[in-house]
Every structure is written in structure tokens, then in C-alpha cells.
Amino acid sequence: MLENDVYGLLAREAIRDLPVQYCDCVWRDDIEGLVSLFEKEGTFQGLFSGIETTITGHDELRDFYLSATDFMPRPYIHNHVVELLKNDYAKGRCYLDLRSAKHNMDWLGAGYYEDEYRLSSVGWKFQSRRFTALRMEELPAGIQT
């Protein structure tokens, strides 16, 4: 029983670190670090004004994030909830306030992520990230609405 509790605590802590690392990579324009947080065939989905964009796999993710560097987002993640469903699979949600480094850190938007996480041989990774924009003042170049 204690072993399961300890495993659950360590797994949740590693999973909670993924969105934090994601934000850190965005702040530093570390595209390779950002892509490495996803499984090889991981996906990012963005829902903006009712239009959904899906990017799959490391190559597409890299291209998408590179196209967004001029956007200069500065994300702040809040209220991360993690549901450990199996020893190697979890789901979670976190909420986003987005600022713009391009525009004197003005408020850019808000929304939330719905994530699926998978334990790999090198640790927890995003299997998928689905971002729903509640309001966005500007969109990155890779998003078509």
C-alpha cells in the first residue's frame, strides 16, 4: 500500500512538471526541448474560435513551434489537476494566462489544456495536449481560423 502511494506521489510530481517545463521552453524559445516533452507521435490540438488545428509527431510539432517564435508568447500555467489512471497513463487539466513579450507583456489570452500523459522509457511525456482558447487577442502563425 505504501509503495503504491509513493509511486502515485512521484508520478504526479513528474507529470505536474511537464506543463512547467513546457512553459519554460516556450519562454526560452527552446524548440527542441519543447518537442522532446512529447511522445514521438504526440499531438497538439488547438481550438481557436471554433476551428481546430491538429499537429502530430515531432517533425510537425517542431515546424509549428518554430513558426510561433515571432508570436513571443509568455505562458503562465495555473491549477494543474492530474488523474493517474494507470501506472503508465494519466490525464490532466491546467489553465493558461498568456502574455505577449512582443507587446510589453500585455495580456494576450486565456484558455485551458486537456492533456494525456504516457510513461516512456525516459519518463513521463505528453501523449496529447488539447488547448481550448477562451479568448485570444492574437494567434500564432501556424493557426488558421
Image (cartoon, helix red, strand yellow):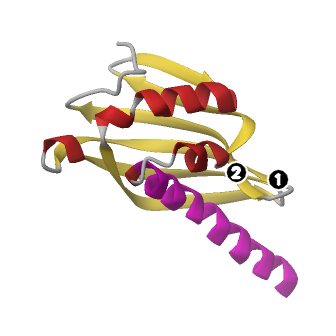
Give the x, y percent position of residue 133: 35, 33
Residue located 38% across and 53% down the image: 27
Whether residues under marks 2 and 1 lie with C-beta atoms below 8 angstroms apart, the answer is yes
The disc labelled 1 sits on which kind of residue?
A: Ser
Q: Which residue is identified by label 2?
A: 125
Give the x, y percent position of residue 139: 30, 26
Left or right for 61, reference 38: left
Residue 127, relative to residue 3: is it above or below? above
Quadrant, the N terminus: bottom right
Distance Cα–Cα, label 2 vs label 1: 7 Å
Q: Number of callouts in the render?
A: 2
Residue located 50% across and 49% down the image: 30
First in sequence: mark 2 vs mark 1: 1
Q: What secondary structure is the magenta-colored segment mainly?
A: helix
Residues packed near mark 1 inside 10 Å, few (<14), some (14 to 19) or many (20 plus): few
Give the x, y percent position of residue 6: 77, 81
Q: Is residue 1 visible to the viewer in this orientation of the structure?
A: no
Disc sitting over residue 18 in the figure: none
Quadrant, the C terminus: top left
Q: Nearest the camera: 136 or 40?
A: 40
The disc labelled 2 sits on which kind of residue?
A: Lys
- Give the residues drawn in magenta, as a range: 1-26
Q: Which residue is identified by label 1?
A: 120
Give the x, y percent position of residue 123: 77, 60
